[in-house]
Amino acid sequence: MSTVDVVKNLYDAFGKGDVPAVLGAMDPNIEWREAESNPYKMDGQAWVGPDAITQNLFMKLMADWEGFTVTPKSYHDAGDSVVVEGRYTAKHNATGKHLDVQFCHVWKGATDKVTSFQQYTDTAKLQEAAGVR
């Protein structure tokens, strides 16, 4: 299976709420970086491992947002990386504000697991919707 296929399957699983399949696609030592100034990890430093990602991001997203969706629009095979362009949409539970913002994700992987993730998005819109700005 190519890394592009692994990444596509990961987004499909996330869209279905199949967190075990999402986590199963991750290398045990995956390095996950949110965009700098993202309210969930302002410094852009990596979380390492699926457990850290689950506790620090996935659980918070599920608690903070209603209908949080990650919709990939295109996948680009870039050799050892896969670049995904798409949109996030959701409604923040505390502020009631809607989020509709584009993203770019860069994944790296080896055979059947992803080993790193880097998010790029408009963090000002994310902060505004979350009420931290």
Image (cartoon, rainbow, N blue to C red):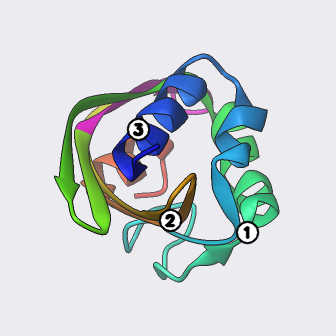
* Amino acid at the residue labelled 1: Gly
Task: Decide which of tag 3 and tag 1 comes sooner along the chain.
Answer: 3
Q: Which residue is mark 2?
A: 110
Q: Residue at x 31, y 69 (%)?
A: 80
Q: What stretch of residues is rendered in magenta?
A: 86-97
**Would you place residue 130 above or below residue 117 in this image?**
above
> Tag 2, which secondary structure?
strand
Q: Which residue is mark 1?
A: 49
In the rendering, at what x and y percent does residue 93 appear? 61, 27
Q: Residue at x 73, y 45 (%)?
A: 24
* Amino acid at the residue labelled 3: Asp
Q: Is residue 10 left or right of residue 88?
A: right
* Amino acid at the residue labelled 2: Ala
Is residue 8 located in the magenta-colored stretch of the structure?
A: no
For disc 3, the neighbor class at 10 Å (few under 14, some 14 to 19, many from 20) is: few
Task: Decide which of tag 2 and tag 1 comes sooner along the chain.
Answer: 1
Disc 2, disc 1: CB below 8 Å? no
